């Protein structure tokens, strides 16, 4: 259930037609990969879409490698934190803590020391650039049904 809930989208623009298909977007992916590997800390807003179509928003904090915090806005009573090896999911309403190995989550991709889109762990579903916005949509290679992550960055300058 945690992984289905974790169908995270940092931005929701799935209807835009891709300028680069994942197969032909290698130069684009290499640029994004190089940029992500320069980051040691990051703070961003996120939008999460569940399998049922419900939306949740919040703040995402990252300190690479391994440390993350997903703080949901009310009314979602959830906090997710990783200290490096394990992703802890706390539901305040249920007063329940769940833990899963970080490397078994899609979020773990962002927390890696060395981010690579061509790994055996990640499958690139789409890489596109349009209107000064770059979107890279990924899923776990072995469990794509567990959800997708869409990274959205501005281009020129890439950030």
Image (spheres, helix red, strand yellow):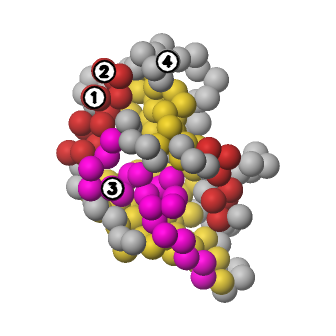
| Res. 27 mark | 2
106 drawn magenta:
yes
Image position of 83 (left or right of 17):
left
Query: Residue 4's spot in the image, x, y percent?
Result: 68, 56
Evaluate if marks 2 and 1 touch, with contact meaning CB atoms under 8 Å apart. yes
Residue at the image point whose x is 27% and y is 50% from the top = 114
Q: Which residue is mark 4?
A: 21
Q: Which residue is mark 3?
A: 112
> In this view, which residue lies farthest toward the bottom?
95
Secondary structure type for disc 3: loop
Q: Which residues are magenta?
A: 97-116
Residue at the image point whose x is 27% and y is 23% from the top = 156
Find the distance from the CA under tag 2 to the CA under tag 1: 6 Å
> In this view, which residue lies farthest toward the left?
38
156 drawn magenta:
no
Instruction: Give whichever of 128, 26 is nearer the camera.
Output: 26
Find the distance from the CA under tag 3 to the CA under tag 1: 17 Å
Instruction: Give whichever of 117, 80 is nearer the camera.
Output: 117
Q: Which residue is mark 1?
A: 31
Evaluate if marks 3 and 2 touch, with contact meaning CB atoms under 8 Å apart. no
Sooner in the amino-acid sequence: mark 2 or mark 4: 4
Secondary structure type for disc 1: helix
Find the distance from the CA under tag 2 to the CA under tag 4: 11 Å
């Amino acid at each position: 259930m945690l992984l289905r809930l974790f169908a995270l989208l940092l931005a929701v623009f799935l209807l835009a037609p891709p300028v680069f298909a994942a197969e032909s977007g290698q130069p684009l992916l290499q640029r994004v990969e190089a940029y992500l590997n320069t980051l040691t800390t990051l703070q961003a807003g996120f939008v999460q879409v569940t399998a049922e179509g419900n939306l949740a928003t919040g703040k995402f904090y990252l300190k690479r490698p391994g440390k993350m915090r997903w703080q949901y806005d009310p009314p979602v009573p959830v906090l997710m934190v990783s200290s490096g090896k394990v992703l802890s999911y706390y539901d305040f309403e249920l007063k329940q803590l769940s833990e899963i190995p970080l490397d078994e989550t899609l979020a773990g991709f962002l927390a890696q020391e060395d981010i690579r889109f061509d790994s055996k762990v990640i499958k690139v579903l789409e890489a596109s650039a349009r209107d000064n916005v770059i979107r890279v949509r990924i899923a776990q290679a072995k469990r794509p049904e567990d959800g997708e992550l869409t990274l959205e960055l501005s281009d020129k300058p890439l950030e």
